[in-house]
Image (tube, rainbow, N blue to C red):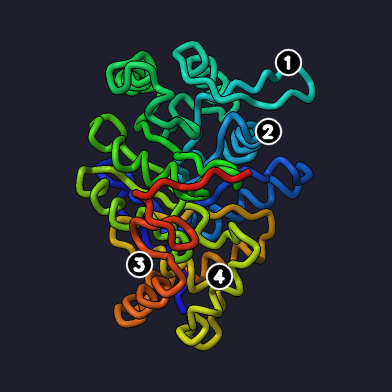
Amino acid sequence: MTTELLKRKLGYTDFEVTALSFGTMNLKYLPDEEAESLLHKVLDLGINYIDTSRAYGNSEERIGRYLSGRRDEIIVATKCGCNPHLDRKGSSHVLTFDRATLERNLENSLRALKTDCIDIWQLHGATPEKLIGGPEGEVVEFMQKMKQQGKVRYIGVSIRHGPKTEPGYPSRYGYECIQEYPDWNVFDLFQIVYGGMVRTSEELLQDAADKGAGILVRGVVRDYFDDFPDVFAKAGLDELLAEGEDRRSFLIRYALSHPAVSSVLIGTNNQEHLKANVIVASAGGLEVDRYNEAKKRFETIGSKPGFFVGGIPAESPMPVSS
C-alpha cells in the first residue's frame, strides 16, 4: 500500500489539501520536545493542512515556534470568535462573535503563528443566528475586509457539534448550518462532523461543494456514544473489512469516498497512530462496490442522510434530553 498522500482541491480556493489533515486540539498536553517532534513528523509524513484555534491553549504558539521555518509546507487554518480571558488564570473560554473579538483574535493568531497571513480563518462554532446581521453583519464584513487586506486568504466556519445532552448530537448543528451558510455566498469552506456512523449531512455536503465550498470533515472515527462498537458489529460491517483492515481504517476510507470531501481531519498525540492514519488515507476511498454496500448496512442501524444518530428523522421534533 502506498504511503503517499494524495491531494484534493479545496473547493474554489487555490489550495490542494492532503486527504488527511492534522488537528491540534490536544497538542497542549505534550511536553515541548514531544510537541516539536510530533509537528515535524506531521510534515515529514506529507500532511500539508494543520488545524488549530485560539481556544486550543498554546497550540498556535507551538506551531509558530517549531514550524515557522517550514511555513511554505503548510496550509495553516485557525479559528476566531474565541474569548479566552487569558489574563484570568483558570477561566474557561467563551465564544463571542463580534468585530472586536475577531480583531483581537487575528492579531494574537498572527503573532503566535509567526506569520503575516492566515491561510484559512474560521469562525469557531458559530451558528447563523449568532452572527448578527447575517451575511451583511459586522462579523462577515470584518472577515471579508481581512481577506482584502491580505491578512487571511480564505474564510470559513468550523461548525460545532454541541454537548451530548442536546438533541441531535453530534450532527444537528452541522445539518442545519450546512443548509443555510452556503447560500450566504461568503464562506470558502466548512468543517463539519461527518462519517459512516454519522451520515446526517451526507447529501448536503455535495450541495455545499457544488456551490464552491471546500469540505473538511471531522469525528470520522470518534465513538460519539458508548455503543458505537456494538452498533458497528450489529450492522455486519465487520464483514466488509479488507484483510488487515480495522474499523478505524474502514471509517476513514468511507469518509474519503464522498466526492465532496476534501480532507479528513484527525488529531492525535501518538506518532504511531499518526503514521497509521497516513497509510490508510493514502489508499483513498473505498472501492465502489464496497462503498455502496457499506451505505446499505449503515442504513440498517439508522445511519443515513437526513437522520440523526439512532435513526431519528432530522426533520422531526426531538425530545430534549435531561
Residue nearest the observer in this picture, 243 or 113: 243
Q: Earlier in the sequence, mark 2 or mark 4?
A: 2
Secondary element at image label 1: loop
User: What residue is rendered at 55% in x and 70% in y?
Assistant: 248
Q: CA distance from mark 2 to mark 4?
A: 28 Å
Tell me, for residue 257, which label it has, or none: 3
- From the image, tell me which residue sits under label 2: 57
Q: Earlier in the sequence, mark 1 or mark 3?
A: 1
Residue nearest the observer in this picture, 28 or 296: 296
Dots 2, 4 in contact, CB < 8 A: no
Q: Quadrant of the image for the C terminus? A: top right
- From the image, tell me which residue sits under label 4: 248
Q: CA distance from mark 4 to mark 1?
A: 40 Å
Asked if residue 4 can be seen in this view, the reply is: no
The residue positioned farthest toward the top in the image shown: 100
Q: CA distance from mark 1 to mark 2?
A: 13 Å
Q: Earlier in the sequence, mark 1 or mark 2?
A: 2
Q: Is residue 46 left or right of residue 37?
A: left
Mark 3, residues whose alpha carbon is within 10 Å: few (<14), some, or many (≥20)?
some
Q: Earlier in the sequence, mark 4 or mark 1?
A: 1
In front of the other: label 2 or label 4?
A: 4
Specify the amino acid type for callout 2.
Answer: Gly
Q: CA distance from mark 1 to mark 3?
A: 45 Å
51 versus 293 height, above or below: above
Secondary element at image label 2: loop
User: What residue is rendered at 39% in x and 71% in y?
Assistant: 299
- From the image, tell me which residue sits under label 1: 87
Q: Earlier in the sequence, mark 2 or mark 3?
A: 2
Secondary element at image label 4: helix
Q: Is residue 261 left or right of residue 322?
A: left
